[in-house]
Image (cartoon, rainbow, N blue to C red):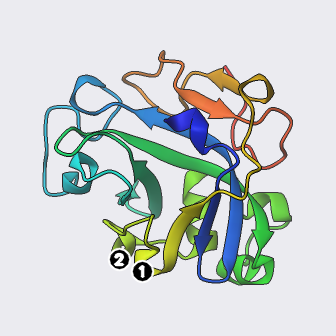
Amino acid sequence: MAPELLGVLVTAGPRVGRIVEVEAYCGSEDPGSHAYGGPTPRTATMFGPPGRLYVYFSYGMHWCANVVCGPDREAGAVLLRAAAPVRGIDAMRAARPRAKRDRELTSGPARLCQAFGIDGTFDGADLVTADRGVALASDGHLVAPDDMAASTRIGLSAGADLPWRWYVPGDPHVSGRPR
């Protein structure tokens, strides 16, 4: 599911971006996943239903967002790592006043959430019905498999060796260099 999100539009109110980088997390069998070891109150959204947004607070300072994609009651999620801004760039700049360049608006999971105004109140939002104003949509500009690349995930101590990160090579909004 993760590579299929490349090129999909994420919207939050007037802000729209095209997803250019994602990472997959495969639930209770994946040592890099928040769901490793089973459900907790924090991870309940990851256990379904699919099509929801799992939002969590990271390092005590940043919000990050994942698309829940596993079957109901089986955790699985795709971290939204980066998006290329499409519309609402002034709103993104207002939300991220320290960004010196537009590339810095949505390059990285925490920056993306801040630019789109996504915080913990969006946890569990239905991305299909645009519940709480956030949604995923396709405008037909999906990334073909030959136009994407894969690498290991970024910033993990467990499960870092798994090649479950997909991105659009050469896109300036991609957050990390491949390993």
Looking at the image, residue 128 sits to the left or right of residue 10; the answer is left
Amino acid, disc 2: Thr
Residue at image position (27%, 49%) is 46
Residues packed near mark 2 inside 10 Å, few (<14), some (14 to 19) or many (20 plus): few
N-terminal of the two: label 1 or label 2? 2
Q: Position of residue 25 (x, y in %)?
A: 39, 34
Amino acid, disc 1: Arg
Residue 125 seen in the current view: yes
Mark on residue 132? 1
Q: Is residue 130 above or below residue 112?
A: below
Which residue lies most toward the front here? Answer: 140
> 156 and 92: which one is in front?
92
Residue 106 seen in the current view: no
Q: Position of residue 37 (x, y in %)?
A: 15, 32
Q: Is residue 133 above or below residue 110?
A: below
Q: Position of residue 141 (x, y in %)?
A: 77, 49
Q: CA distance from mark 1 to mark 2?
A: 9 Å
Looking at the image, residue 67 sits to the left or right of residue 84; the answer is left
Q: Position of residue 155 (x, y in %)?
A: 51, 34
Toward which corner of the image does residue 56 lie, by quadrant? bottom left
Q: Are marks 1 and 2 in contact (CB under 8 Å)?
A: yes
Residue at image position (55%, 58%) is 110
Find numbered disc 2 in the image and state the secondary structure of the residue it sits on.
helix
Toward which corner of the image does residue 157 lie, by quadrant? top left
Q: Is residue 2 above or below residue 125?
A: above
Residue at image position (65%, 80%) is 95
Label 2 sits on residue: 121
Toward which corner of the image does residue 138 lie, by quadrant? bottom right
Looking at the image, residue 48 sits to the left or right of residue 95; the answer is left
